[in-house]
Image (cartoon, rainbow, N blue to C red):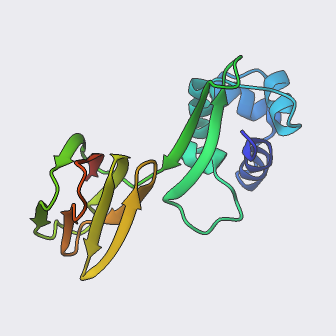
């Protein structure tokens, strides 16, 4: 929620919409919009979706750090509960046009999966749960440890490998 107030104000002004106009278009009270822009309010994720839709922008445009150049790597807390242990972190985003698939993968030690390039515009979002993923993209390998994530275009040669002695588990989202 760190960047919502600045982003909301800047996006609203860029769209040429008043706070009252945004309230009417989104169904969110003007008082809540004033509080959000002032950094004094907490708002539900569904209400942020309504504001984004009214501004014709994405949810990510409202919550991401405006100084970061990557539109896919976000890594921002977007919700906090009453307890310090309760939070939601939006890790990353990828453009989608038709379908999203979620996969749970496991690779035993020494296993490799080599994929054919997908059509242009397809992306993967991978989150490593346990072990270390060696991801090779167009011949360049990178290791991702448990707790890390990566977003990349699959319109290139790529492979997953587990050169380690522990079973690798990761979640893979395919976005088309």
**Going by the picture, which residue comes out furthest to the front?**
165
From the viewer's side, name the closer residue of 44 and 23. 44
Q: Is residue 108 left or right of residue 5?
A: left
- Locate residue 124: give its quadrant: bottom left
Tell me where residue 20 appears, x and y as whole percent: 80, 30
Residue at image coords 56%, 53%: 74
Residue at image coords 71%, 51%: 11
Name the image quarter holding the N terminus: top right
**Going by the picture, which residue comes out furthest to the top?**
82
Residue at image coords 64%, 28%: 26
17 shown above or below 140: above
From the viewer's side, name the closer residue of 133 and 137. 133
Tell me where residue 128 appears, x and y as whole percent: 36, 49
Determine if residue 57 is in view. no
103 shown above or below 146: above
Tally of numbered tags: 0
Determine if residue 54 is in view. yes
From the viewer's side, name the closer residue of 44 and 28. 44
Tell me where residue 99 appears, x and y as whole percent: 24, 44
100 shown above or below 73: above
Residue at image coords 70%, 51%: 15
Tell me where residue 94 appears, x and y as whole percent: 40, 55
């Amino acid at each position: 929620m760190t960047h919502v107030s600045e982003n909301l104000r800047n996006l609203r002004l860029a769209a040429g919409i008043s706070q009252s106009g945004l309230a009417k278009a989104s169904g969110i009270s003007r008082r809540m919009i004033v509080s959000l822009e002032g950094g004094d309010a907490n708002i539900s994720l569904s209400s942020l979706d309504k504001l984004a839709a009214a501004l014709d922008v994405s949810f990510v445009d409202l919550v991401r750090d405006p100084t970061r150049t990557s539109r896919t790597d976000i890594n921002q807390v977007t919700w906090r509960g009453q307890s310090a242990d309760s939070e939601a972190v939006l890790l990353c985003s990828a453009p989608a046009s038709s379908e999203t698939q979620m996969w749970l993968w496991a690779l035993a030690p020494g296993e490799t999966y080599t994929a054919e390039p997908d059509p242009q515009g397809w992306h993967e979002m991978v989150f490593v749960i346990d072990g270390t993923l060696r991801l090779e993209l167009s011949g360049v390998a990178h290791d991702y440890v448990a707790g890390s994530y990566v977003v990349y275009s699959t319109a290139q040669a790529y492979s997953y490998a587990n050169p380690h002695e522990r079973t690798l588990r990761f979640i893979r989202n395919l976005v088309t």
